[in-house]
């Protein structure tokens, strides 16, 4: 039997078969097996160990590409390339690919799926301008507050920028408040706090001899932070002159409660026989004579 010796000193004989192998990072060329022939020679050409390279990128995939930085091609043994999805897509499958053999890349084929966002979390006293189960990448939502509330966070809109990721912080709506009126003259006000919230109603009670202007005794805090009415207590004015009417009187004054004044009369055609020209204002809004005059 013919014999031969391999590199490690082992003696092999016909019909032994050996497979060439190289150190990591190298590949035998050719990589075919060699057999010990009957003539004591090995079949085939002697292999050489050639550096492993990948001469092109892994197979292309939809909606993305490989991030190759500044190296390759060719790519050396153990070089790695990362899949990167196009804008609006997210990597659902596959990761880095490694050059593990001659023109062989390890790793799963990448899959890029469209980015979507679930609805953002709800916020108190407000809502968004749209409502869907899912939103596409780039979708824009505008938050608004309910009537009587205002936005305390600087959030004008929110955009779907990543998988279930919205730009900006969650909006916050705070109730509108009105500054309570200053101290009321000639009356009392039931607003004890410096500010009152939206839709709060305040009331006034006027002192004796005074009345609410235009009969308005309440005011409501409106959605714009102002009061619906200006509340004032004004002196009671007597405007009923029926108790002092006479053809001799030229004019009737408008008097505040308890005020006393002398009226003008037509002295050309009338004289006062007795009594006084003084009138006063009663709490019934009537002008009355202090000492009823008689004219002649």
Image: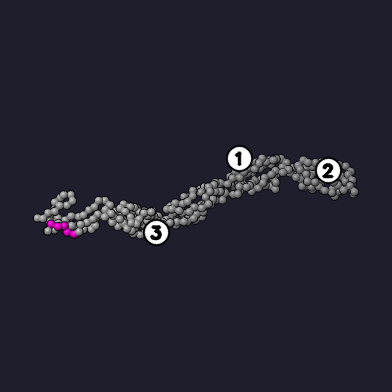
- Front-lying residue, 182 or 203: 182
Q: Residue 166: image x %, image y %?
A: 46, 51
Q: Quadrant of residue 133?
A: bottom left
Residue density around tag 2, few if under 14, some if 14–19, many if 20 or more, within 10 Å: some
Question: Residue 128's x, y, as percent?
Answer: 50, 53
For disc 1, the marked residue is: 193
Left or right of 53 on screen, residue 234: right
Distance from Cα at disc 3 to Cα at disc 2: 98 Å
| Residue 233, picture quadrant | top right
Give the residue number, with chain letter if any, for mark 3.
63
| Magenta stretch: dominant secondary structure | loop
Q: Position of residue 192 (x, y in %)?
A: 61, 39
Counting residues from the start of the chain, the first of labels 1 and 3 encountered is 3
Q: Residue at x 36, y 57 (%)?
A: 111
Task: Of the two numbered discs 3 and 2 on the same chain, state the one appearing first in sequence.
Answer: 3
The magenta region covers 40-44
Mark 3 Cα-neighbour bin, 10 Å: few <14, some 14–19, many ≥20: some
Q: Nearer the viewer, residue 170 or 265?
A: 170
Residue 262, numbered label = 2
The residue sitting at 32% across, 58% down in the picture is 55
């Amino acid at each position: 039997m013919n014999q031969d010796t391999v590199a490690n000193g082992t003696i092999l004989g016909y019909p032994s078969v050996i497979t060439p192998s190289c150190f990591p990072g190298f590949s035998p060329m050719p990589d075919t097996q060699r057999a010990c022939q009957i003539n004591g020679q090995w079949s085939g050409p002697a292999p050489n160990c050639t550096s492993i390279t990948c001469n092109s990128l892994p197979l292309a995939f939809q909606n993305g590409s490989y991030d190759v930085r500044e190296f390759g091609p060719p790519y050396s043994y153990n070089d790695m390339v990362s899949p990167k999805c196009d804008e609006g897509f997210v990597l659902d499958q596959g990761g880095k690919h490694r050059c593990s053999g001659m023109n062989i890349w390890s790793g799963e084929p990448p899959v890029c799926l469209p980015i979507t966002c679930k609805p953002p979390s709800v916020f108190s006293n407000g809502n968004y301008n749209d409502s869907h189960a899912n939103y596409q990448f780039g979708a824009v939502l505008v938050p608004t507050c309910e009537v009587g509330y205002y936005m305390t966070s600087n959030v004008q809109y929110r955009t779907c920028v990543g998988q279930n990721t919205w730009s900006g912080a969650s909006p916050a709506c705070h109730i509108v408040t009105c500054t309570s009126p200053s101290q009321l003259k000639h009356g009392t006000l039931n607003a004890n706090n410096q500010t009152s919230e939206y839709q709060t109603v305040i009331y006034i009670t006027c002192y004796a001899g005074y009345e609410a202007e235009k009969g308005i005794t309440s005011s409501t805090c409106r959605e714009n932070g102002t009061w619906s009415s200006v509340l004032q207590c004004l002196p009671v004015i007597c405007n009923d002159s029926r108790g002092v009417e006479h053809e001799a009187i030229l004019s009737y004054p408008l008097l505040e409660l308890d005020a006393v004044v002398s009226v003008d009369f037509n002295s050309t055609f009338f004289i006062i026989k007795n009594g006084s020209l003084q009138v006063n204002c009663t709490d019934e809004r009537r002008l009355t004579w202090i000492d009823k005059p008689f004219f002649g």
